[in-house]
Image: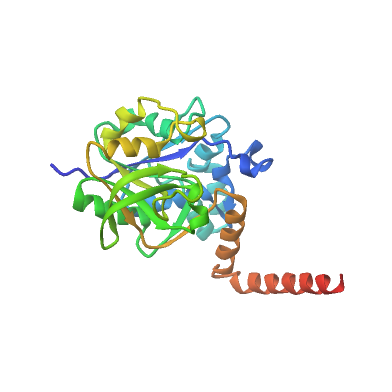
Amino acid sequence: MEKRITKAIIPAAGLGTRFLPATKAMPKEMLPILTKPTIQYIVEEAVESGIEDILIVTGKGKRAIEDHFDNNFELEDNLLRKEKYELLEEVRASSRVEIHYIRQKEAKGLGHAIWCARKFIGNEPFAVLLGDDIVQAEKPCLKQLIEQYNRTQASIIGVQQVAEEDTERYGIIDPSEKNDRSYRVRNFVEKPKKGTAPSNLAILGRYILTPEIFPFLGQHNIGKGGEIQLTDAIQQLNSIQKVFAYEFEGKRYDVGEMLGFIRTTMEFALNHEEYGREVENIMEELLLTRSSLVLKT
């Protein structure tokens, strides 16, 4: 019998060391892109894709995530009395999702974080969305993958092409067959050494996985970086059942590192309905000022 994808896992237990000292007391997932924390973009994509239950895997010092998706009666009452109805609706939107939480007690890697969710998932296929990747697409990225799962009833890994020099930063697929945007995969390689990547198709933070992956994650095998890697378990899963990759449509933003975060913020600001033109003027002014200073020196 075909099973629907109704559950999603969002790992959010990382230490956020690339954004220190800002993340010393604030979860990196709460760093805002304009007026919304990055994790809210991820949750909204899941909801728009038809996900009904979300489990966020947190760690020490991540309480702000739970508070953000909870009701805030005092704030809502204040906005209501001041007749700020549009802002009130935006605040309420973040608390209308069925979200569950579990803590990853030890920082053992992404694979371990997914393994921590095994009892929540049970014997169902499920989605995984990583918080470092925001995808803007006409059809939500996760929904594209779910449609592929409905067709194949097999695990689907979201991929896109990256520059050859960047392949060592990602899990990379070694495709054996291609059908339109879908690939049958021979091997999954976690962060291959420079010049050894089997392709430039990188795994970019969106997965549909079958529950058969949990026994492999439960082996707690240590991979790259001394952590339990999800990519390694997917490779093992691929040995017993078909795993496909799908080159999803849409623009992916890497908010897990500083330059990517800055670029995303700038682009979202430029596209802002109300402030976009003013932001453009500010940027032009800053660039002109910088150019004149360079000429003077």
Expressed as whole percent of the image width and height from the top left, the position of residue 181 reads 30, 61
Q: Residue 247 or 209: which is nearer the viewer?
A: 247
Relative side of 193 to 144, left or right: right
Q: How is the image coloured?
A: rainbow
Question: Does residue 6 sit above or below 122 in this rendering?
Answer: below
Expressed as whole percent of the image width and height from the top left, the position of residue 264 reads 56, 59
Instruction: Name the quarter where the N terminus is drawn.
Output: top left
| Residue in the image at 74% along x and 69% along y | 286
Which residue is farthest front? 195
| Residue in the image at 55% along x and 63% along y | 268
Relative side of 191 to 260, left or right: left
Q: Residue 95 or 16: which is nearer the viewer?
A: 16
Residue 101 visible to the viewer: no
Quadrant of the rendered image containing residue 200: bottom left
Expressed as whole percent of the image width and height from the top left, the position of residue 52 reads 32, 44
Which residue is farthest right? 297
Residue 157 visible to the viewer: yes
Expressed as whole percent of the image width and height from the top left, the position of residue 44 reads 42, 52
Q: How many marks?
A: 0
| Residue in the image at 48% along x and 42% along y | 69
Which residue is farthest left? 1
Instruction: Name the quarter where the C terminus is drawn.
Output: bottom right
| Residue in the image at 51% along x and 29% along y | 107
Q: Residue 282 or 216: which is nearer the viewer?
A: 216
